[in-house]
Every structure is written in C-alpha cells, then in structure tokens.
Image (cartoon, rainbow, N blue to C red):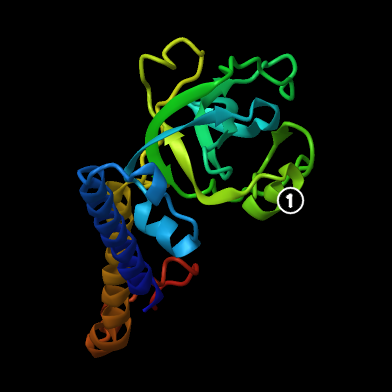
Amino acid sequence: MLTARFGVWQLSRAHTKIAYANLVAERLTMPAVPQEALARDAAAAEQQWHRQVVLTGEWVGARTIFLMNRTMDERSGFYVMTPLRLPDGSAVIVQRGWVPRDDADPLKVPTIPTPAGPVTVTGRAAPWPSHWIDIGHGNGGPVRQNLEREPFQAESGLALRPLTVAEEPTDANAHDGLRRDWPATLGGVSVVTNYGYAVQWFAMSIAFLGLYVWLQFIRPRRPAPPDSESPIDASVDGTRPQ
C-alpha cells in the first residue's frame, strides 16, 4: 500500500538523520585536523567533514562572495565566503558567518572588515554549500545565489581545497559584525517531525485497510433488512391502504 511505503520512507529518513548526527558528534570529539593534512581530494574531504580545524593563512578579501537569500532567525541575509590563502599557495573557502541584508537594497554588498596579514581561523570542516535554484545571480560579482568550486577556481585563479571551513566564534572575530549561529547539521525537518509524518501515514494505512475489510468482507455478509423496515411508507407517496 502506497501510504505504508510513505510511512516506511519517513522512518528511514529519521534513522538516517540519527546516524548522521551520531557521526557528527563522534567527529567533533576527534583531534583537530592538522593544517598540513587538510584534504586535497573529494574522498579525503568527506572523511574530514565536521572535524575541528585550525588554519593559518591570509584572507583574499577581494574574492569575498556573499551568498544571498540565506536566513537566520527568519531574517534574510548573506553567508560571507572568503578564501583563505594557505602558506603552501592553495586556498580554502571559509564560511565566515552571516550578515543581514539591507532591506532597502537587498543586493547591496555589506561592508565586512577583513584583516590584512596572517590570521588564524578556527572552525569545522564542512561541505561546499548546497546548490540552490538560481534566480539570475549565478555568475560574476560578489553577490550570488550559489558558489561552485570548479567555476570559482577558474575565475579566481586560486587552487581551492575540496572542502570549506565554517568559522566558529573566537575573541579575534568577536567584533566583525558576523553571526555564526550555524544551522543544525541535520538540516531540513527534525527527526521528531519525520516520526510524526510516519505515524500519520501508518494511521492512514490502517484506516484504508479497515475500510477495505468492511466493504469487501463484512458488509456483503450482513443480512438484508426485512421489507417491513423499508423507509418507504405508503403515506409518503399519497396513497393509503384500502
């Protein structure tokens, strides 16, 4: 039955999220990834997601990208993405934080202080931001809907690592005006919501099954009512018995 399959699917999504949350919790307890061991290929990058990292390098402020339509506390704004050039010449995109947009001019580029010279960045290794439906701000300029590694690497000339770093709050960045209340790693609806949806689908399955049993097996076996119980009465059609 289709509704039962939907219920099983919701349970599967909940179990996947729980397993992923456990993986994230485990990786957060692991030692920080040394800078020299930072991933250089996609397979290694996935094994480092959600682990702590501490990087030293220099901001490439001129290549800062503002990802639009990102929300925090139900307010729209930008994720600030700035490349950090490492001592070996490669670079990693740092998700520096969130800043609100100017409601009078939603595409106005915010002013973000970017220190010159060597800096130390503390954060968690993270995948590249997921791709959103492009609404006309895909290529060129600092304000964009998406940021893809290969096109941006070709555009900027930077040798980008295959992961990003979500910067965490520190004393050094406490006054840069960026919020770093990053969304939960599970994403989407909560596990409790998935369980609630599953219960609803299973309840619908039970209701449909009960209706089927009633119509196919129970109702046909019920005796027909006698003629005397017919709702039609002679007085209804204007006739009376002689």
Q: Position of residue 107 (x, y in %)?
A: 74, 25
Q: Secondary structure at mark 1?
A: helix
Residue closest to the eye, 20 or 193:
20
Left or right: 48 as drawn, with respect to 66 = left
Residue closest to the eye, 38 or 69:
38
Query: Amino acid type of disc 1?
Result: Ala
In the rendered image, the quadrant that contains the N terminus is: bottom left
Residue under the point 66% across and 33% down: 65
In the rendered image, the quadrant that contains the C terminus is: bottom left
Residue under the point 34% across and 46% down: 50
Q: Position of residue 115 (x, y in %)?
A: 56, 17
- Check disc 1 and report the residue beneath it: 154
Residue 112, by quadrant, is top right
Q: Confirm whether residue 208 shows in the render.
A: yes
Left or right: 119 as drawn, with respect to 21 = right
Vertical order, 235 against 24 (above or below): below
Q: Position of residue 202 (x, y in %)?
A: 28, 66
